[in-house]
């Protein structure tokens, strides 16, 4: 990879859309976004892999399970022990577990860990709403591919606490509605 925008120890990941198929074996692909929180730069990525899984239809019969998940951008923030470039995540081997259920609209509980990267928390939450008819449980070994194109964030900073001017939390005491240093 030929990109470098500075090392960061603060990152976030979010899943946008994913698809999986499970019947004994399982395959899945996830479109993800990786965010360098310190520098406010997005990197698009893909998680793709295979593993084992089971599925069932609403009537209780074991069968092939297919799922499609559409997630709103819900960031899972994490830190790494040693500052990294976005390219350091490229071609990382990951483990992903997913349990999902639904009759039309359902929920997918998904956890990801990236091997070879000391990150906290150890399991990154990629859960979200899904479209399915039944239930499935899959465990996968996946590869994380990170695009070498960066996108600078515009507007409000994306941080764990948010930006108070953009709906995030404020550091002001709850009883104080205005900044005492501002003229009125």
Image (cartoon, helix red, strand yellow):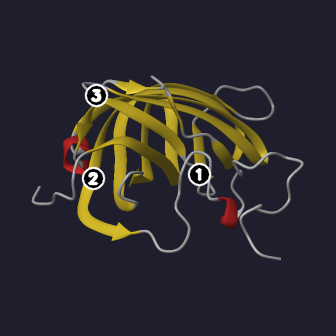
User: Looking at the picture, does residue 1 appear above or below residue 135?
Assistant: below
Residue depicted at 15% across the width and 60% down the height: 3
Q: Which one is in front, 28 or 87?
A: 87
Foreground label between 3 and 1: 3
Which dot marks residue 68? 1
* Quadrant assignment, res 72: bottom right
Residue depicted at 52% across the width and 27% down the height: 138
Q: Residues within 10 Å of mark 1 (few under 14, many from 20)?
A: some
Residue depicted at 40% across the width and 34% down the height: 79
How far apart, in angstroms, are the residues tagged by discs 3 and 1?
Answer: 28 Å
Q: Which residue is mark 2?
A: 146
Residue 59: image location, x then y, percent: 81, 31
Mark 2 and mark 1 lie on one chain; the one further toward the N terminus is 1
Task: Assess whether mark 1 and mark 2 are in contact (beta carbons under 8 angstroms).
Answer: no
Residue 90: image location, x then y, percent: 22, 45
Residue 153: image location, x then y, percent: 44, 69
SS for dot 2: strand
Q: Residue furthest right?
A: 175
Q: Residue furthest bottom?
A: 184
Q: Is residue 87 left or right of residue 15?
A: left
Which dot marks residue 117? 3
SS for dot 1: strand
Residue depicted at 51% across the width and 25% down the height: 53
Foreground label between 2 and 3: 3
């Amino acid at each position: 990879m030929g990109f470098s925008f500075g090392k960061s120890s603060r990152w976030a990941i979010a899943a946008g859309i994913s698809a999986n198929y499970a019947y004994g074996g399982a395959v899945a692909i996830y479109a993800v976004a990786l965010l360098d929180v310190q520098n406010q730069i997005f990197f698009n990525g893909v998680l793709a892999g295979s593993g084992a899984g089971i599925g069932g239809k609403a009537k209780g019969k074991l069968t092939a399970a297919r799922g499609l998940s559409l997630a709103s951008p819900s960031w899972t923030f994490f830190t790494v022990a040693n500052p990294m470039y976005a390219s350091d995540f490229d071609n990382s081997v990951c483990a992903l577990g997913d349990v999902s259920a639904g009759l039309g609209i359902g929920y997918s509980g998904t956890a990801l860990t990236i091997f070879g990267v000391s990150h906290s928390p150890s399991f990154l939450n990629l859960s979200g709403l899904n479209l399915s008819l039944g239930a499935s449980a899959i465990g996968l070994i996946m590869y994380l591919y990170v695009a070498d194109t960066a996108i600078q964030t515009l507007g409000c900073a994306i941080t764990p606490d948010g930006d108070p001017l953009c709906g995030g939390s404020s550091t002001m005491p709850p009883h104080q509605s205005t900044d005492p240093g501002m003229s009125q």
